[in-house]
Each structure stands twice: as C-alpha cells, then as structure tokens.
Amino acid sequence: MKPHVLVLLGILFGPRPVAAAERVEFARDVLPILSANCFPCHGPDEHDRQAGLRLDGPKSIAQARKSGVPVVPAKPEESLIWQRIVTQDPDMVMPPPSSNKLLKPAQIELIRQWIAQGGEWQRHWAFEPVRRPPGTLDDLVRQDLAGLPSPDGVLALRPRARPETLVRRLSLDLTGLPPSLEEVEAFAANPSDQAWEELVDHLLSRPQFGEHWARMWLDLARHADTKGYEKDLGRTVWPWRDWVVRALNADVSLGEFTERQLAGDLRETPSSDDLLATAFHRNTMSNDEGGTDDEEFRVAAVKDRVDTTVQVWMGLTMGCSKCHSHKYDPISHADYYRFYAIFNQTEDADRFDDNPRLELPTPEQQQRRQELQGQLELRQKDLNEARHRQAESELQGTGPWKPIAVNSGRSEGEALLTVGTDRAIAVSGQRPEKDVYILEGTLGAGRYTALRIQTLPIQQPDGQPGLGRNPADPNFVLSELNLDVVINGDLRRLSWRESRADFSQQGWPVAAAIDEDLKTGWAVSPRSRESHVAQFELKTPLVLESDTPVRITLSQQYGNSLLLAKFRLWTSDLAWGDLTLPSPSQEVEQAQKSVTEAQQQLQQLAGEIPQVPVLKELPPNRRRITRIHNRGNFLDPGDEVQPAIPSGFGPVPAVERPTRADVARWLVNAENPLTPRVWANRIWARLHGMGLVETEEDFGALGSWPVNGALLDWLAAEYRDQGWSLKKLLKAIVLSEAYRQESETNETLRQADPQNRWLSRGARYRLPAEVVRDQALAVAGLLSLKQGGAPVMPPQPAGLWRSTYNGRSWIDAEGEDRYRRGLYTYLKRTTPYPSFLMFDGGSGEVCQIRRLRTNTPLQALVTLNDPVYLEAAGGLAKRALNSAGPLEQRLRDAMRLAVLRAVSADEVAPLVQLQMRALARFKEAPAEAEALVKAARLQPGATPTPEAAAWIVISSAILNLDEFLTRN
Amino acid sequence: MSRNPLSFPPSNSPWGHLLSANRRQFLARGGLSLGAVALQQLLADDARGEAEPSAAGSRAPIPMLPARAKRVIYLHMAGSPSQLDLFDYKPDLDRLHLQDAPAAFLEGKRFAFIKGVPKVLAPQFRFSRQGESGQWLSELWPHLSRVVDKLCIIRTVHTDQFNHAPAQLFVHTGSPRLGNASLGAWATYGLGSENQNLPGFVVLLSGGKTPDGGKSLWGSGFLPSVYQGVQCRTAGDPVLYLGNPGGIDRSLRREMLDTLARMNTVEFERSRDPETLTRISQYELAYRMQLAVPEVMNLAQEPEHILKLYGAQPGFVSPAESADDPRVLYKGDDPTFANNCLLARRLIENGVRFVQLYDWGWDHHGSSPGESIDETLPIKCQQIDRAISGLLTDLEQRGLLEETLVIWGGEFGRTPMLQNNVRSDFKKGFVGRDHHPFAYTMWLAGGGIRGGLAFGQTDEFGYYPVANPVSIRDLQATLLHQLGLDPHRFHYRYQGLDQRLIGPTDEGRVVNEILA
C-alpha cells in the first residue's frame, strides 16, 4: 500500500501512462489543449479576442453569457464550450475551420471528462510556488517508479554501476574530462561512500570543473568570438569567458552570478570584474554590413537581451509578445515593451567599434604602458623645449614674421585672457563650452600681407602638454578667424584669400577657419599636444601709414570646451609665396622622431590590450524614450511606456523606475516560481541527458509536463535553499542512488521505460561535442590543460572561412594551442568549428537552451578522419607502444586506456584480428604506413613503421567505440 | 511525443531509412559475422520501433496534401540581380533617364546607400519578347530565352528586408534573424530523403564567397541538427572529412568498421541502447557515403554533349573561388556555376531532396567596375545563362522537371534609380542600382508550376506591384504546398510555439494562380 501523500503527489505531477479510471487533471491534461486551441482567440491577447469571451481563468469560464455558461460544473452537455466543440454546424463549431486547428476525439473526451468531474480550474503548474516535498531525492524517484503501472516489481532503482564506470561518469559529468587510470584504480580499490564523497569534492574543486560547466553557460549566453551577420568580424569577449570559468569555480551563488552579469555596472563602486561580467549581454550580434541602419540592429540586440533573459532564467518565451500580447502566458504586448524599456537604456548602439568597451590590461601591460607613458612624457617635454627654443630664436630674430603687439584681450565666455612678456596670450578662468576671443592691438605703419597663429601647449592637469582647455580632449576648433582694422572709429573687416597650416585634423582643414561657416573649423587632433602654426593671407595687403588699432576675433563654436589655451599672433609683409611654413630645426626634428616612436609603441600596446564590450547605462539626460513597436516593427512606434517588470511571476520590486539590477533581484527572488525550477531542471538535464521537463526552453502553458514533478520541486527547493549553489546541487544529485545506478539494462526493463524517463536506470548518452574531442585528446596524452586566454585555432579543413568582406583567416595552431580544451576553440558565428557543429554544438548566434542530440554519419567521418582524431589515435598508439607482452594483453591494456575499465580477452578478439591484418598490409605497403604515421604525427622511435601504423589503426578503432563516445 | 501527425521524432532522418529496412540490409550485405542472437534482436527492435513504418518501402510519411514536386533546386543569386535589366521591362525609365527621381519614390523610404535625390536609370540592356509565351527578356539571356516557356516569371515579389544578410535569412528561413530552420531543413524534416547514401539537403557555392547570411542560410535552426544542409565542395573533400587519411585505404577502412561493428554489437547487448545500433548503421552509411558522394560529384562521368549543354568543365577550379576579392577575376566563361547546376541534376537524380545553390557576386551598386550593372552583370549572366537553360532542358529530357521545382532569384531587387553616393555622374563601369525590397523578379519552373506565365505587374517604373503582389511568405507557402506539406499546419514545436516556415501569422498564402 502506498501512503496517502504519494497518491497525491502522483496526481499532482507527471504524465504517466494513465490508468482507465484515473482522474483527469486540468492543469496537466486540459489546460494545454485550451491553451493551444482556444486561448489564441479567447485568451490574454485583448487585440485578437473574439466575442469578448475569455477562457483563461476560473472566473471567466463560470461567467454566464447570453447563450449560456462556458463551463457548467459536472454538466458537459449544458456547458457552452462543450456544445460549441461538438456541434455539427460548421458556422458554430469551435475551433472554427479557418483557424487550422482541429481537436482530436481524445482531446474532446478529456474536456468532457474534466467538466463531468466538476470543471475545476487550476493554474499552470510551473507558475505555482515551489514547495519542497518530503523525503530524499531517492525517495522521490523510488515512489515514482513504484507508482508506475508496470509489471509488479519490474521498475525499481537499479544497482550501482561498477566503480570504474562510476568514476568515469562522475569525472565526465563534473569536469568534462575522463579520470586518470590511477583515479579509477584508487576508487575501485575502495568504493566506499566516503571515498565517493571525497572524489566528488575533489572533482568539484578542480579548475576543469568551471571550464566544463562554462560551456553550458556560453550556449545560453550566445557567446562567440565574432560579431555575426554578414561581415562577422572578430570581437574580444574571451576575458568574459574566463570570468565565467572563475565564477563557476568559485561557486558564486546564482544570485550574484545573475546580478553581476545583468547589472554589474550599476553597483555602487563596480570592480573591473563587475563591469566585465556585463559583457554577458554584449554577446548580442552587431551588423557591420554596409548600408545598415544601426538603430535597427541596436533594437534587435536589446530585444535579444530581453528574450534571452526571460528564456534563460524563467524558461519562458517572450518572443510572441514583441508583436502582440502572448496567446497563452500572462505577458501582454505592453508588458513586453515595459520590460524592454529597462534594457533600452544602455549606451551601446550597434557601433562598428562595439563601444562602450572595458580595457583589461594585464599587470605587465599596465606596467609597460606606464613606462611608455613616462617616456613619452619626457620626450614630449624635450620636444616642446626644442620648439620653444626655436620659437624664441624666431621671436628674437629677424624672420619674416613679427609678433603683434596685443594690448588687451577679452572672452565672450568670460574667460581671462592675459598677454605675457613673451607676447603669448594665455587663457584661464571660466571655461565655457564655446567661446569667442577678442584681442585688441596695434599695428604700426607698414605693409601687411598675412596673419599667423601659433598655438602653444600648456601643462594639462594630467601633467601632459596640450593645446586646448578641455583636459579630456586638449584639441581646439578655430571656427572662424577675423581681422578688423579701426579706421576713423569704424571697424573695417578684412577678407582672407588663402590659408595653410603645418597640420590639420582630417575633416577640419585650416581653410575652414576662414570660410565664414561657424559649423566648420580648423582642428589638430590627434596632434593636439604639440605646437602648430596656421597662416592666413589677406585678400589685399593692408597698408598703414601710422599706428592703427586692430581687432582680431577667434571664434570657437564646436562646443565641449575645445578652446585654445595659449597662442601667439604674428604678421608679415612678405609675399604669400615666400611665406613658407617654418621648417623645424634639426633639434625639433630629432625630438619629434623620438616622440613619434614612443607614441607608436603605446599604440601597439593599446592594440594588444583586450577591450571587451560591456554594458553602460546612459546618463539620465540621455535616456531613450521607449514606445511599443506595433507588430514588432521599430519603425512603427505606438504608445510610450515606462519601465516595469512583468507581474504574475512572484513579487515585483516596489520601485518607481526599475533597473537591470531590479530585474536581477526579481529573477532570483526566493518566491519566483520559475527560476529555481528552470535551473534545477537544466542542471539535472546536463547530468541525466534529458530534463525532467523535456522542453527545457519552455516552462509556459504549452511546454511539456515534468515527468517527476515532485523530484523537480525537490531539486528546485534544494538549489534555492542551499544558497543557489551549483556545486551543492550537483553534489546532492551525484551522491544519490538514482545517479549511481548502472545504465545497463535488459529488454523487459527497456520496454517498461524506453527512454529512461522514469529514471529506472543510470543515464547513457553520447558525450557533447567538446567532451568528445577533449576526451580523445586526454586519453591520447595530448590535451593541454592551460586555462584561459584568447581563443585558439586547432586544425580545420582549409578554405572554410569565406565570409564576405572578411579578410581574416584561420591558421592551424601548432604546439600546445593545437590541443587545448574545446572551450577555447575560436567560434566564428557564420562558420563554427565544423566538428563541433556536427556534434550538435551551436553557432552562438542566438541563445541555445539545449542541444538536441543527433547521431549521424558525418559524426562518424569526424572521429574517423578529422586530423584531430587521427593525431589523438597517434597519441594513444604511442602510449600503447610503451607496453610489452603478448599482443592480446597489449591490446587489452590499450583499450583500457580509453574505456578505463578492465577489458577481457574476448572483447579484444576483433582487435587482435584487425591488428594482424593491418600489420600485414602495412608490411606490404610501407609507404602507406609511412603516410599514416606522419599524418598521425607519431614519432615511432624504435618501433618499425608498419607496426606503429597498425597501432594507429587500432587506436583509431578504440576512439570510435560506442562505449568511448558514450557516457554510461 | 507531439500529438500532431506532422511532428516527427528526430529518427525520421534525412539520411534515409536507417532505422528500418536499412539496418537489416547492411547486416545482410556487409558480410558481418554477427551472432544470430544479436541479429534477431535487431530485427525485433525494428518491428517495435514506434515511429517506424512497415519494413518494406519508403518511410516517408503521408504528406497532408498531394505533392506536385518531390525535389527542389533553388538557385540563389546572392547580392540580388537587377530585375530591371533582366526581366521587368520598363521603357518609361528611358524617358526619365538621368533625371531626378520623382519625389514619390523617395518619401519616407529607407535606402541602404542612396542619399539625396538620385537620378532615374534606364534599362541598360535591350529587351525583346521571347518564346511562344512572348515574355519580355533582356538580351543578357540568349540561352534562357529558348526555355522561357518553362518559366513562371513573378515580377512582384516583395520583401521587408533591405540588407543582404537579414534579407537572405528571411527568404531561406522565414525570419530575418538567426535561429530558424531553412527551407531545405524543413523539406527534409517533412519528407526525409530518398537516398540512403547521400545527405537529403545539399548546398553548393560559387562566386568566390559564402553568401552574406552565412551558414545559417542552410542551418537547421531549432530543428535537430541532422536536418542542416551539407555543403558539398568542389575542392578538397566534397564533404568535410569524407576522405580516409593517407595510409588507410578502403579495404582497411572496411576491416576497421567490421571490427567496430562487432565490438559495438557486444556493447549493445550489454546496454540495450538503441542509439548504439543507430551508431553502427551510421558508420556503415559513412562508409557508403565515402563512395557515393565522390561518385555523384564526379562530373567526368557525364558525356560530352551534356557537359556542353551546361557549359560545364569537370575538375575546373576557378581562381575566383579562392581570391580575396573574387569580383576582379570574374570571367563569363567561368564554369563553376555550370558545374554546380550539373551536380544539382546528378544529386536530384540520386534522390537528394533539396539542392541549394548560392552564387555570389550580384550586388551591383556601381561603386566599382567589379560590381556594376554595365560591366559585371553581363559577365555574371554569361556565367549562369547557358547553365540554367541547360539544367532545365536536361531535367525535362530526363522526365525530372515535372517533379522538380526549380527556383531562381535574389534576396531583393534593385532600384529604378542610379545609385549616387559613390559618383554622381553616369560613368562606364560605375553604373549601379541600390537595394529595392518593394518589387522584384523571381522565377519558378517545373514541380507543378505553370510555365510560360508572367505573373504580377509592377508600375511603369517597376517600383511597386500594381497587380498580384507575391510576398516571401507567399513563395514559402507555395513551395511547401508543392512539396505536399500544408504550409499552415506543417510545424515544429519549439519554445512553446508551433514554429512554421511561414511565421506565426497566416498572411502567407499559396499562390494558386501560378499552379499548373
């Protein structure tokens, strides 16, 4: 007899083979039918609602209408929905033929039974609060198995798997790598519970743990090393990937993991790691294709962030609500854009340079940069001094230019202009955005053909020289230059003819200072830290017979305080053609050269320092207004909305203007029903090969029902209540008997539970893409355990990278980088590494919730012929060649290196035969043996080449064994 | 298991009928020494498989509609050819040539590159009526004009995307964003493959570049990855990793696979995991593919008159295929595309369900002579003209055209205006048109489509449709319909939605007017 509570649990959870008399469960059996077939027109979407009828709540189904009551408890034939479903009248029948929906007789019968039972409404199971069921994990599995209508006693937990199998299983599950033979032997010698727990703790503490579990997170985070779309250029995100590995190894709680990635930049004093974590949502794609509208792809990226956030944490799809209110789940069209409004306030905007970015120099780079900056400073100083000396000598000398005697100067922006003894005009005091300098002076009798401005650097607050007044950008923009002569008390403006300067910024030529357009001007970036001269020719020479007052106006209208800090004014009487720009003295030239060198070194260093795209909130005065996009089209804006978090999934923080940080807190709030279920299910699925809810990506009304709902809630509660610790949850699972069951089975058991949905045996499934490769390299003794750093390019067939307009190429790595873990392989979105793609790896283009496992001939071709696996075969052959003894024993040992268990003589009989045939063939054809040994990169040493080649064939066969490719 | 009859489990493999008759066949043919017990178990397993039909014959599920086409050859011209210089004849543009474009063209429009007021650009080539159907074709189609009566030319295709990558994704996956399944993936998911030794969905590239949308254009999206297109290459291994490593010949490979099969069968006896059996058969299929793929890819087997019909040259490797900028190497007699057309026929003939060709180099903005209407377009047309007419002729003479749907087109059209952001003057080698999503030309042939039909009409400038507009969704709906798959009901459950090629709304419709 089963205790009462179990009967209840059995009813609440789990679509199991339904016995004839079993009760219909509304949430499990009927709600999905209504959701899929009725709610599109009679559900939450107000826009498409027909006849004002809603069927998505307990009140609305009981509400009387003109034609009747939708659901009359216990009376199907009196219930409106039943009448409309079974009517023969094509104008009346529901769902209408035009909807392309058709209820099956079994579904109609379920609806009838439900009404007959009383027509009681239940909420969708996943939106109900998570409560921890009594008992242990194993109790819940056992109870579930016991409740199945199968031949008595057939389904029960299977015995534990062999110790060797268990160690391999655990090591692959927790670290993605096979254990060493020594680890296997140690546990096999003492397979106690204590030894098992110690092994679990040991594996959880290995740095390879974080690398393995990061892969799951990178899939969800749609991580890749390129930007996507047409050009698919490279992007530096690997520092974020390394952060994920570190965070997982440190077992940071899901709360912190969430908050830092969604909103690390919003912390009070964010650390560099906090900022780096936000690169999570900068993994969205950018479109650099010519002629694209940046706003279109910025919007696409923000929508991706919204969709990914809800998908990853809550297992719901918000995609539908982009265009209209959700048809089944409680998310309206406006809800979507209110939530979107929270994410719509970051600075990034599909820019080519992916700004804003976080610079992450290594300590060495930082030191090097400091050194170089110091050097540059000194050299710049030398240069300035050299220039100064040259200028001074010109000032004293009899050159073609004479300084203007400026008497006074004022600024419209109320800055202070002072004239020094060296005739230089220095600006201080007020620092407006824009300014006009007006200088009064006197020109003596004589002829004047041209005016010259010499801009002079001042020492900026950072200790560097700079020409302008804005320390952050010491450039200036001289919008317009005017010279007026005072004749008889009237100002007479002189016209310019030509201009030249020793240097002009691109797009800001010196001629723009005399084009009578205040929007244009002369500027000098990036050389805004050194002196420059510009000279301007008068249209007609000015001839003065006596001292005459003049006024010189320097208008600087760019804004951002790009204003001159110090300058001198000169005149000349020579013909324009003779007024060449001053050539630098030899001393200046030398100094300039060494400054340029230091600048180039700094620039080169800057190129080597990783710059990772990160989230950065817009300042309040630049916040975007968010409007609903009608039918999802950003060019068709509707009503303005204010940021808000959707209600209906646990408590919403009571703040007026929720931020990403509030979203993070809401997602991991203990009362959120979805987050713990979704995550527990996901983690379970990574160990068991399939989630308790098979549709890991959909916990909404149309998702699949959990096979063991009590177990799911137990796991969810365990995860949440143990501080959202991934390692603790994993430990709880792997310590269970359910996890440690043997995966071998017999025909009767397999038939009773064909897909092992009821956990009636240990899980057995083909390893994920990266693990397939890492494992082969590991048993071959080739795998590098180097952690972190820029992605690497292991061999792939030539000519795969052919993106349009993308000159980058794939260069097969040599040395250690050839054999790094799969996590570190360069992932180009439009052309992913082929062998991972073939083993169901993703492209990182969109959030990938789970990988659907396939079994294809292309996979066979990879593990047979891809050079990576051939080299792995070479590595394994090398290990095997070290053995001695009879052939059979050597083959047993070789196979044991891969499958990590004792191998019987019977098992290797086929290998013995293969070895002999291969050897015979290679003896006949030594050139072939040579070719194979070379391709496998095996250095046979003293072993004759034909024998070495035969061992490669053997090793390749072993690496292709189903048992080897499988976690069992 | 889904309740919808069209949601097949992933075991409905595009790799043929592996799980049923096949498994038995390889056991019988492969000369494996499996124990009698194991064999019995394998057979018993077959009989029990839930998704499996009776052992005999095809396992293709009954389509929901009568199928008019069994296979598809889709010829995509990546970059988008100018409909106004090839198919949609607009003499009125001559009248306005190099005058400012009428304001109505520009108001409220977004262009990829055009800025300011552009000039109208006349058709750059002569047009004449061709064939019994009297369809207008430009002089760039001397060969196509001979088979024009087989074509249904739709002049009013319109899209809502005007950048290459999103527009290509929209045409091929039904969504301008990534993550959806491609046409070929849907077709093989719905219908499986007819050949056990070849992939059901094959992709061939030419023009020197991968199309802008990348591999996602033939990806499986949310469908299981077995349904993604397999790119067959003309240089290197035709299928990645197909060739054995140096030193391992076919007989040694056979020995290895026999060894593996024996050992894996023992493993199966232990585990009872049907995946192990599938793996054994997939290794066998890989072995057969190693012969079948190079065989089908070997154009040298074709007789001279057929090679000539297409303008194909077996073994030719174009320098443009590996150039940084292939456009500067384009030559009219480059046979790469012709080779791919001939390969397409051979693949179709061998039961491949969906053959997708992409030819890059059709983005003729006029910013350089390598991408201009006046200089590049004639070269590109020369590369494909004979090849396509050869393909249609060949398919017909083999009785294949009736059941093979051939589709030709780009991802959008080109403007009636001269593109003016690079040069404002009309200069040889710099004649170009910008992207134009509102109306452009595609054509269909075979597969139950009416030949000799010009469908849809655009206004006098070719700017907008004025009669019978056809959206990308309409085209997709029509394609599925011809394959016998009801576009509205054919779906795959993912993320809580019944995902369909034609998207969530029902606006896509089968263009019944063009059906034979």
Image (tube, coloured by chain):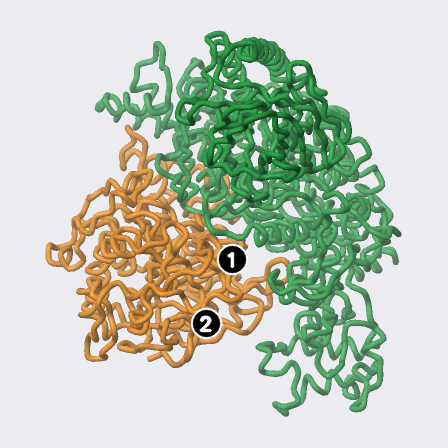
Left or right of A747 in this view: A810: left
Identify whether A484 is placed above or below A91: above
For numbered disc 1, what is the local secondary structure? loop
Mark 1 highlights which residue?
A: B176
Q: 10 Å neighbourhood of mark 1: few (<14), some, or many (≥20)?
A: many
Chain A colour in the picture: green
Q: For this view, does A518 lie left or right of residue A255? A: left
Q: What type is the residue that disc 1 sits on? A: Pro
Given residues A437 and B321, the one toward you in this image is A437
Specify the quadrant of the image occupied by residue A5. bottom right
Mark 2 packing: few (<14 Cα in 10 Å), some, or many (20+)? many
Which mark identifies residue B474?
Answer: 2
Residue at x 61%, y 28% (from the top left corner) = A548
Q: Tell me where residue B270 appears, x and y as whole percent.
A: 54, 41
Please state the chain letter of the residue tagged with numbered disc 2 in the rendered image: B
Which lettered chain is shown in orange? B
Which quadrant of the rendered structure holds the C terminus of chain A?
top right
Percent x, y for residue A906? 45, 30
